[in-house]
């Protein structure tokens, strides 16, 4: 959020747009079109196969338009069938029996009425090999049902159709070590009602914060804060996000926590600070003065406070249904809370994290982000979640994000200025902006007061390149989108969509939502 150093904040943090229906709706737009062409090739083997070429054409629009082409080609080749000698019939064993309720991926092998078949391409549930209405099944000949069904090592398993099968399928795609680490980093502890200052039952990460940040220190840092921002609510927010100020085996966890707090508080000071020269309190201690974006109220009629243009998109509104209100017919999603959470596509995911996967709670009542403990929890939410191609601020400052050669060459390292680039891109210019200079100064002040040595840290900001797809944070698939290779399933991608795999939980809820939304089905 760019703010005048001597004025109250009037704009919000630079949240990435989240794609819907393979499209994106704001700054950093991305629009993906997939077109499929097919040709049929007959071979001399028993299987007739279909070669599919999928060309994904990506148009990226910022202030200028550029077009690049990404081609993905899947060649379906004949699969060698497995035979098993019979003591009597001499026929190969029958494959697993075809099921009318099951969809089948390319190369799947089934049996029906003692005849083996192989799928040339994706076959919908109910497409019987016996009738072969679409020509998608190749007969491999008669088979012996008395023998043990052979495996099909060269072909994919059947496309999942039940809820349990889809969850198992999602789990099989979610084994990447980086993805698993990130899920652990954003894990939640929903049992926070008992958290209170000094309570013996407080979680370990809360106790760590209490050792570093006492109630008196909170009052010292935030003497100009709006009364809605309380120490108790901050501890509750820390407790909810168990990966914040976590224990780091073999490392100085308290020092890492101080670094995280200094970073977060520095951004608080820029986003919600008074920036006043007229009071005898340094600017780094003037933060949390505002709950809502300047000039915006809950009953406002100022169009600049609506932030709800995306609500009119039917596809988008199906995933994150905006609440009804007086602002163009919808609620207003202007900046609220310590990090000025803005836009419905940020309120919806935050609501999912807080309210057991339900995006509608905060979309219907966005004022909760200002008036309840969520005014601070929303800041930690923004802090710990990566936004591909950007890493999380948590990962930058605790060292879990590892920059690659492209990041280092672009000036993106495990130092505070990289978090400036994440939150508002203020390090991209050739000279140091006032806002970036403020943030750096505030960070140094908080760190010094906490006894944190920053002498070995880099504060080079100007000239840093924006995070892009060449960086290490863009190499891990952590969002779900409908597969363009296999009908009926979703796949992990490295760009943002409406379905965040980091929010999956043990039941892979985000994957299930992706399948149900993309293919207009209800899994059971």
Image (cartoon, rainbow, N blue to C red):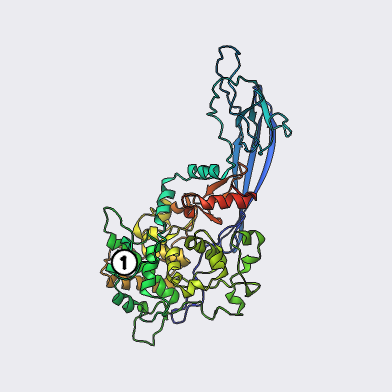
Nearer to us in this view, 406 or 523: 523
Q: Residue at x 62, y 65 (%)?
A: 310
Query: In x, y percent, where is residue 120?
Result: 65, 32
Q: Along the line of sight, which residue is nearer the eye, 248 or 45?
A: 248
* Relative to 393, 300 lies left or right: right
Residue 53 position (above or below residue 204) = above
* Residue found farthest to the bottom: 278
Q: Which residue is mark 1?
A: 209
Does residue 500 appear left or right of residue 130 in this picture?
left
| Residue 474 image point, x, y percent | 48, 52
Any part of residue 2 in sight: no
The residue tagged with tag 1: helix, strand or loop? helix
| Residue 150 position within the rendered picture, expressed as x and y whole percent measured from the top left | 54, 24
For mark 1, does the 10 Å Cα neighbourhood hold few (<14), some (14 to 19), or many (20 or more) residues? many
Q: Is residue 521 visible?
A: yes
Residue closer to the observer: 349 or 294: 349
Give the number of marks. 1
| Residue 54: x %, y % from top left | 63, 42
Residue 301 picture quarter? bottom right
Work out whether 318 lies above or below 56: below
């Amino acid at each position: 959020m760019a703010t005048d150093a001597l004025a109250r904040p009037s704009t919000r943090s630079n949240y990435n747009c989240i794609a819907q229906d393979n499209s994106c709706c704001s700054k950093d737009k991305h629009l993906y079109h997939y077109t499929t062409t097919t040709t049929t090739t007959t071979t001399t083997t028993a299987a007739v196969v279909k070669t599919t070429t999928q060309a994904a054409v990506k148009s990226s629009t910022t202030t200028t338009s550029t077009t690049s082409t990404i081609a993905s080609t899947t060649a379906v080749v004949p699969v060698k069938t497995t035979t098993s000698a019979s003591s009597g019939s001499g026929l190969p064993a029958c494959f697993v029996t075809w099921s009318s309720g099951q969809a089948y991926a390319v190369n799947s092998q089934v049996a029906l009425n003692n005849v083996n078949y192989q799928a040339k391409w994706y076959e919908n549930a109910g497409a019987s090999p016996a009738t072969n209405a679409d020509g998608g099944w190749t007969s491999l000949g008669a088979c012996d049902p008395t023998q043990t069904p052979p495996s099909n090592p060269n072909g994919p398993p059947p496309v999942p159709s039940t809820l349990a099968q889809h969850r198992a399928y999602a789990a099989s795609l979610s084994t990447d070590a980086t993805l698993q680490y990130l899920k652990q980093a954003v894990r939640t502890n929903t049992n926070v009602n008992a958290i209170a200052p000094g309570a013996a039952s407080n979680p370990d990460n809360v106790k760590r914060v209490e050792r570093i940040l006492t109630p008196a220190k909170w009052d010292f840092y935030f003497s100009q804060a709006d009364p809605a921002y309380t120490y108790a609510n901050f501890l509750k927010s820390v407790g909810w996000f168990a990966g914040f100020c976590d224990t780091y085996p073999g490392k100085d966890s308290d020092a890492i926590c101080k670094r995280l707090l200094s970073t977060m508080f520095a951004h608080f000071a820029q986003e919600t600070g008074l920036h006043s020269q007229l009071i005898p309190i340094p600017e780094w201690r003037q933060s949390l003065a505002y709950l809502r974006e300047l000039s915006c109220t809950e009953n406002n009629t100022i169009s600049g406070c609506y932030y709800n243009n995306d609500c009119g998109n039917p596809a988008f509104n199906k995933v994150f249904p905006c609440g009804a209100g007086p602002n163009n017919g919808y609620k207003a999603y202007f900046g609220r809370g310590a990090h000025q959470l803005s836009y419905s596509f940020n309120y919806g995911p935050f609501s999912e994290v807080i309210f057991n996967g339900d995006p509608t709670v905060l979309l219907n009542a966005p004022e909760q982000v200002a008036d309840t403990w969520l005014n601070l929890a929303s800041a930690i939410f923004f802090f710990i979640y990566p936004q591909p191609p950007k890493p999380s601020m948590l990962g930058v400052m605790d060292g879990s994000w590892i920059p690659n050669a492209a990041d280092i060459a672009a000036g993106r390292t495990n130092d505070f200025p990289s978090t400036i680039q994440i939150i508002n891109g203020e390090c991209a210019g050739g000279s140091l902006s006032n806002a970036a200079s403020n943030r750096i100064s505030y960070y140094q002040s908080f760190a010094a007061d906490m006894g944190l040595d920053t002498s070995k840290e880099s504060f080079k900001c100007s000239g840093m390149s924006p995070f892009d797809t060449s960086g290490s944070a863009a190499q891990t698939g952590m969002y779900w989108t409908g597969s363009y290779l296999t009908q009926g399933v979703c796949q992990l991608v490295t760009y943002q969509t409406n379905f965040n795999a980091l929010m999956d939980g043990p039941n892979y809820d985000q994957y299930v939502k992706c399948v149900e939304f993309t293919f207009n089905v209800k899994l059971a």
